[in-house]
Amino acid sequence: MSDYLVQQAVQNIWCTPTQDMQQIVKLAKITRYGGVYTKVAVMWRQYNLPVANVLFHVYQVGGISPRHLGLTMPAVAGLWLRMADVCIAEESIVDLYNLKGVQSPRSLCWYTVTEDGDLTVAVQAYNKLDINYNTEDLFMRVYHNAYFGSVRRDPAVDYIVVKGGILNSTEAILALQNQYNIYAAKGSTYAFVNGYLVNAINLLTVNVNDVAEFVYDGAIYATEEIRVGDLAVFDSELDTKRKYLVHPLAALKTTITYQDDIDVFAYLKDANGQYKGIYFHRNAPDALRQITHADYALCIAYLAAYAEDQNWPDINNVTLRIQLRKSGWRRSLVNETNRIKELYKLPDDEILAAMVGIDATVPEWQAATLEASKYTEVMRSAIVQITPAMVQQAYGYNAMSQLLAPTPQFSKNVNNQVVVDIPVNLQYRSTVFEYDFQGKLLGWYTHTNGASWLARNTNTHMVEILTGYGLTRLDERYGAQAVQLDKTLDYRMYICGIYNTLPDNNWQDVTDGHLYVVNAANTLTWLTDTHTTYTMVRSNRDFLCYNLDLPVQRGVIDFVLSSEQKRSDGFTNTLMQVAMGELDIFMNGYALVEGVDYIVNFPLVVVINKRFIDLTKVNQLITVRFCGHSQKDMTRTALGDRGFVSHGVLSNNDRFDIRDDKVLHIAIGGAVYDRSELTFAENHSGVNVPGVPNGAPYVIRDVVVPLRGTTNAKTYELRDAALVTDQHVSDYLTMKLPAPTFTELDVIPSLYPVYSPFISALIDDLKSGLFNDNRINGQYNDDVVRDMCRYYEKFLPFEPTREPNAVDLDFVSVQPYYKDTVTDLTLFQYRFLYRAVDLYLNNAASLSRFVTATV
């Protein structure tokens, strides 16, 4: 699985730095001071120079084939090829420049390969170039954009043209100007005069005998100017240098524009908008670095050096020209640990503010953090350097859970069979829950192994697949002094006291404490006294799942959560004492929402839903699904986002919830949905979405995905770290991106019906005669009412009319009985019932329409 994650990172994040055959080499000069004419000696052999009677400086790259640089191989040794022509033929960009960023024109540069196999470069010296070839180092960058070899290329516009040379007449200037204008009209064109970048080629920028040149590069999709004084500044953690944050507005928002596919020039404009720009080269790897998919860090010290060389008085007035190119691989922005996707939901100016400055309060979004992140490290690394640990840190828990075990999945028809493709980490030891087109549970089944699932029900529309088998017994070891642990699982360790030789079941979580040791062989040994302390070790290999056929007993549907536990000799069905993490309850196939449809006082559960009770049946089918580990304080995992559909959307709760990279269980009004079928307030325009019943209760709960040994870290440790990031990001976006406002009336067709278990039990017992206390026929005070209701007080912790379980009466109707029929009671019974409702529930549930009194 770690190999799978590395593969995913390579396919979706890695920018294949070598794909462009991009090399920057320092040329080694082999000619004498002052240069040479006509011929040059290379390794004791004489070679004619490209042009006779012209001064050249000649350099060697060494025993390297031009093919390795994406250049044409000369047909014979000593045959000179002009760089400008090769750029066109090979669709490559060649930049020759000095440390000051002044370029040596491609039209005045040639290369050949000697008989000894040495790549040799000849540069024509020209007195108008601000390059001292005698004393200054010369560098060559060769860049062959892999985009030109991709299927996305449009041959009509995606190619390279380089034209120019020494212009010894006004007519030559005008001819090159005409060519420049033709290509400039297509965009993606930039020009040089005497080695400096200029804004155009014309009689204002070029003089007779200047050397001028332009480059048309069809891979450039945008060019943007940014004033240096407008750039934010930060201190790099990666390089310990002061840097500018460059945020090109024209950069693609959902696709990586890799740093190697960007050119940067710098210049100071005069009053007429004219300039002489230098090339901001990347001889040093920290000159320009990736921060996000579309943000970059530019080293201030290097730019300051250029400004000093050019005598620019104020660096703040310098303009940066950013040329953005299409890349060979189109890498979309993926889910990753720092939540850049969420950052990019902000407007551009607020994206910048979130990365640098007083508003940069989300640590994960600060520019220094992003530059040093594993996400950008994966982009720029050699493939052999990309490790599982690097990928784990780049993705984080949520993105890994989405890659390994996303659910639900939709079915498809294959040869008249209903088939579901199974994600990689669910292809073994998992459980499949099948749903019909209405989102109703059809059944659940264990899956042993395989990449596909053949549905058991022909009307299966969607499935949820959970890690592990759904069983009535968990992977637990009670009272064992030593337990062999599985490195692919996550464990919790618990203890309770022993009283009169029996466990007192007052359990506490001691995971990662000092009461046990785990040796190199992964064997856990308890250090506790077996006479006073009872132990339990639980893994998340499987989860609790079972069906119950329950009658409505004495007006209430209730049950206890239990499991098969081996406390001594054998397994017995025992009341659960230690909760698990995530609880789901279904009734007759309908997904229920905790706090509305049922209430839990662990381990007791009372179902108060009325809508899905099937009164045509004696028993109601209850499906219990209890997964994962509880929290450190022994409580269950947070219940998630719960509420009621409002204005046709979910989560209209005045909070920006983070969901894009999470595996979610979504239930609305009894049906299970996939996120693709729904609209959330976080990305909603304010227009109602049909098909979702307004006013229906819903729950959106994170599915905790066991990573099963995919990483060295533990599932819950990684998830806890992700939750911290979620909190930071959600708090920030709640402030910056408020929930949409709706002007239309929120129409709810009908209130959602639930019943009061306290009243329902009383009504049922009064009607059946099980309640036969004769005191109701006389006079009595509140104390007597309480005495007569002692048995029924056990339902008060599950009462939807009382805190902490009080439901929202704007959406819910609390009714007194589980049936919709009218119940006829005697006058004394009715009077007692009314007194009880008034005393315990403050008349929160009306008896009218459901109960009548007969004299």
Image (cartoon, rainbow, N blue to C red):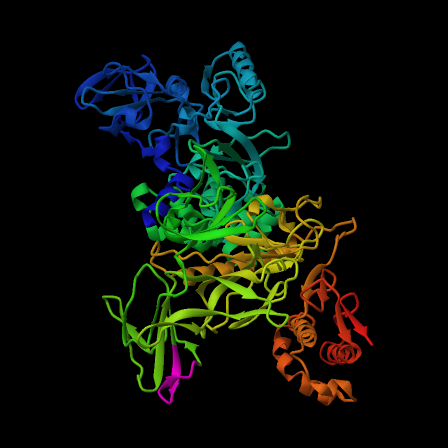
Specify whether residue 36 is in view. Answer: yes
Does 633 lie within the magenta span? Answer: no
Compared to residue 105, the image places residue 581 above or below, namely below
Task: Pick out the residue farthest to the right.
Answer: 855
Q: Nearer the viewer, residue 117 or 693?
A: 693
Which residue is the extreme one toward the top? 171
* Residue 140 visible in this rendered orientation of the protein: no
Q: Position of residue 336 (x, y in %)?
A: 46, 49
Who's the residue at 51% across and 39% down the image? 311
Relative side of 796 to 443, left or right: right
Front residue of this view, candidates 294 and 322: 294
613 vs 407, left or right, is right
| Residue 426 in the image: above or below residue 840 | above
**Magenta stretch containing residue 497, yes or no?**
yes
Location of the C terminus by quadrant is bottom right
Q: Quadrant of residue 451?
A: top left
Q: State the predominant SS element of the stretch in magenta.
A: strand
The picture places residue 479, in percent across and down from the top left corner, at: 32, 77
Q: How many marks?
A: 0
